Image (cartoon, rainbow, N blue to C red):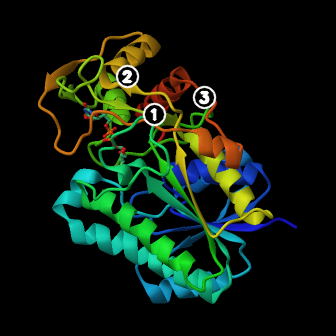
Amino acid sequence: MQEKIIVTGGCGYIGSHTVITLINHNYEVVIFDDLSNSNLKILDRIQKITGIKPHFEQVDLKSSEATHAVFKTHKDSKAVIHFAAHKAVAESIHNPLMYYQNNLFSLINTLKAQQDNSIKHHIFSSSATVYGNPSQMPITEDAPTQRSFSPYGNTKKMAEEILEDFTNSQSDISVISLRYFNPIGAHESGQIGEFPTAIPNNLMPYITQTAAGVLEKLMVFGNDYPTKDGTPIRDYIHVVDLAEAHLKALQRLLGPKSQPLEVFNLGTGNGYSVLEMIKAFEAVSGSLLNYEITDRRPGDVPEMFASTALAKQVLNWEASRSLHDMIQSSWTWEQNLRKGLK
Ligand code: UFG
C-alpha cells in the first residue's frame, strides 16, 4: 500500500519539486496550501510530469480550527513535510508580525494536529540563515545559531527552538530539520519553476529577469567584501537536488533509525561569488548581462557554504547537479515563462 504524505506549501517552489520526487517514488501526496504565493495550475503541471494529480486541500494553517479539521480528514497520513511559510526577507522587515504570525502559528498548529492525529513524522524547511554570520567555513551543523538580521530568519531560528522543545517533551513525533542554503534552478521538464509574484529579492531570478528584459539592470550589492573578488559567496543548490534530499529524510524518518530530532545542511559545499554567478550565467545564455556595482545590502554576510558531510553520512544524500545545470534550468524556465507559460 502507498504511504500517504502531507506536503504543506506543496504548490510553492521547493514544495512542488518535492511533490514530483515523492510521486515518482510511489508515495501518495496530499497538498495543503493557502495559495497565498502560488497557483493551482501547478497541479496540472505536476500531473503532466508524473501522470498523477496530487490531492489538494486549500487551507489556512494559521487557523487552528481549519488545521485541525483538515488533518482529521487525512489522519491516515504517515508524515508531514512542512514548507508552508512566507520567505521574503525585505517584506519581513517591514511587516514582522505577519511573518511571526504566519510562519510560527502554522508550525504550531501543524504540530498540534499531528499530535492529535498520531502522525508521527515531520520534516521542517529551515534555512542556513539560522547561522547568522558564521566564523568558520564550511559551516557544520553544530555551529552556533544566531539571532537573524530579519524577522524571516528569526522565524526559522524560533521554529527550530520550538521543534527542539517539542521533541524533548513527551512527544513521540520525530523531526528532521533541513537547513537550505541557496536553492535555484528548475525542473528539467521546463514545466515547473519559481513563480515570482513581485520583483524578486534573490539573485538568480533577478539575473534571469534582467536577461529576459523584464528588469532593466541587476544591482550587485557591494564589491568590498573580504572575498576573492569582493562580492559575497553563497552555496547555490539545484532545487531538484533539494527535493531528493527531502525524499532521503522521509525514508530515514519512516525507517528503523529515526531519531527524535536531527538537523542537516542542504548545500553543495561549493561557494560562488556574485560576479562568478554573473559570468556563469553569461556563458550559459551567450549574452552579456546589464549590471552595476552598488552599495552593500544591509544584513548580507560575506561568505556562506555548507559542510555536506553529515547529510552524506546519515541520509546518504549529496547534491549531484552542476552549477551549469542550475543556471541552464533557471534560464530555460524564465524563457518558458516569457513565452506565455503562466
Ligand atoms: N544579490 C545582488 N543583487 C540582487 C540580489 C542579490 O547582488 O539583486 C547578492 C546578495 O547581495 C548576496 C547574493 O546575491 O550576496 C545572494 O543573495 P540572495 O538574496 O539570492 O540570497 P541570500 O543568501 O541573501 O538569502 C538566501 C535566501 C534566504 C535565506 C538565506 C540564508 O534567500 O531565504 O539565503 O543564508 F535566509
Please say if 228 is above or below 127: above
Q: Identify the mark nearer the N-term, 3 or 1.
A: 1
* Residue placed most toward the observer, 317 or 84: 317
Distance from disc 3 to disc 2, alpha carbons, whole Å, reads: 16 Å
Q: Quadrant of residue 221?
A: top left
Q: Residue at x 72, y 47 (%)?
A: 50
Residue 105 at what x, y percent from top left?
Answer: 39, 77
- Mark 2 or 1, nearer chain start: 1
Amino acid type, mark 2: Met
* Amino acid on which disc 3 is placed: Arg
Residues 251 and 335: in front is 251
x, y percentage for residue 150? 24, 56
Residue linked to disc 2: 277
Horizontal and vertical percent position of residue 53? 68, 58
**Camera-nearest residue between 199 and 203:** 203
Q: Is mark 1 within 8 Å of ligand 1?
A: no
Mark carried by residue 236: 1
User: What amino acid does circle 1 point to?
Assistant: Tyr
- Give the left or right position of residue 117, taking residue 129 as reference: right
